[in-house]
Image (spheres, grey):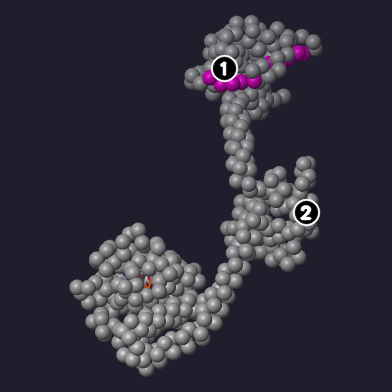
Amino acid sequence: MPSPHLSIEAIRLPAFLYRPDGTILAVNDLAGVFAGRELAGCSAADAVRIFTHRRLDGTPLTPAELPDSRALAGEEVIEAPLAVTVADGRTLRILVTASPIREDGALAGALVLWQDVTGCTQAERELARYADDLRGSREQLGDVIEATGAGFYQIALERMEGTISRRGAEILGFATPEMPSLFEIMAEAQARMHPDDLQGVLGSFMTFVEAETERNEVEFRVRSLDGGWRWVQAISTSAKRNAAGRVVMLAGFLFDIDERKKAEAALRRSNEELQRFAYMASHDLQEPLRSLVSFSQLLERRYRGRLDSDADEYIAFIVEGGNRMQRLIEDLLRVSRVETTAKPLEPTNSTAVVADVERAMETSLREAGATLEAGDLPMVRADAAQLEQVFMNLIGNAIKYRHPDRPPAIRIAARRVGPMVQFAVQDNGIGIEPEYHDLSFEMFRRLHTHDEYEGTGIGLAVVLKIVERHGGKVWVESTPWEGSTFIFTLPAA
Ligand code: ADP
């Protein structure tokens, strides 16, 4: 027969075994650690002194109310929740189960088991609080997302489950107030997607799921309720990947970008039309203007001094006006040519480009007594002819807008900034007032009158157009009467 001590040790909860007279026969080790002393031989009344039992509202129990005593009186107590202060001073939440032990109908003792739920309830309470917080922030997040007009979706790819916000379904062209399941929506969205966009979207999505990209952005058209096409943008981020790097959970946003897309297309069309117009106008104007200028020059040469002095002056005005118009038209054509003669961007040696420009501008540099300093410049991805044009315009301006008291000193430098190369063309000229810094890049904008400096106000507009075509930026830093630095960025090669 197994000894009672052995059998009570087999119980995996703190256990107290009582004799019918109410003294303790045995406790297991799990119970012993709570007492901090030998319990065998103690009575239930002793146990009350060792462990302070209270109800959860804090009121104390009388010895008769103790589950141990009630079991000894023949009552079955199941999971009575009590706050018990143990020997080391901690108060634990215990579910006490106390059962009378009967032998042949007579009371042979009682077994009391403790289930320590202190940690559990704390964890449960914390869990409930987290769940509350989470629900709260989800609702808030949902409100914020709704307020942006974006739709939201979440897909668990392995479980083939997902959710989509009401706005998301709406953007995909669903008008139903009751929400279809995500996969109905996905199947339907595919069926409604513009056939020209479908393959691209699916391909890009598969690459995203398989490959290590953080984000997937697609734009596609879906058939809208009125039968037309509407542009939609979907941005997915990988919420979770498995060990093989496959996306298992993703979340993303849907945006209705129809108006933006249509505005972009309209802008593109109107830009193209404007460009065509500018090209045609300037091209077709060249011919009549050329004859106007050459005949007025002829008039000037043949009839100077043969008419009266007023006539000589008028003819000179016509010649000058004609020349100026020719320059304007040539510059206008140069602007249209930024697009029409554009070549693909290729690795370009900017040191060589600057050297070519220096050679081409040798005469004007020499006549102005200018110095040009350019160290070793990096390789960039550029259209070499256009890069030449940029340097030519900037160096040309540095010479033109030079300080009356000193010869132009021009310095060209470059440094790498992330994926771009930042060039700086610095001069010691007259400088530009701060309020004109941005304006100087506007087409036909001149900060100085025609009487002071020759020009059409096109040079910097061409620089801006070329740099933007390369995906770069251009700006000026300048102090009046000290000098200007024109800074632009181009993609590094
Ligand atoms: P343009 O030289 O034909 O007037 P740009 O477009 O080249 O046209 O320049 C626009 C204006 O910016 C110029 O009229 C001039 O006032 C100012 N500007 C350009 N470059 C410089 C410079 N290096 N120093 C001072 N002012 C400049």
| Inter-mark Cα distance, 1 to 2 | 70 Å
Residue beneath disc 2: 226
Q: Nearer the viewer, mark 1 or mark 2?
A: 2
- Callout 2: SS: loop
Q: Is residue 96 left or right of residue 222?
A: left
Image coordinates for residue 364, horizontal then vertical, percent: 30, 84
Q: Amino acid at mark 1?
A: Val
Whether residue 426 appears in magenta in the rendering, the answer is no
Residue ID at (42%, 87%): 296
Whether residue 97 appears in magenta in the rendering, the answer is yes
Above-or-below relation of 13 to 68: below
Residue beneath disc 1: 84
Q: Is residue 224 left or right of residue 37?
A: right
Q: Amino acid at mark 2?
A: Asp
Region rendered in magenta: 91-103
Q: Is residue 451 left or right of residue 249?
A: left
Q: Tell me, yes or no, if residue 10 can be seen here.
A: yes
Above-or-below relation of 203 to 139: below
Q: Residue furthest bottom?
A: 302
Q: Quadrant of residue 266?
A: bottom right
Name the residue nearer the viewer: 202 or 26.
202
Q: Earlier in the sequence, mark 1 or mark 2?
A: 1
Residue ID at (78%, 54%): 226
Q: Is residue 484 left or right of residue 280?
A: left
Q: Tell me, yes or no, if residue 348 can be seen here.
A: no
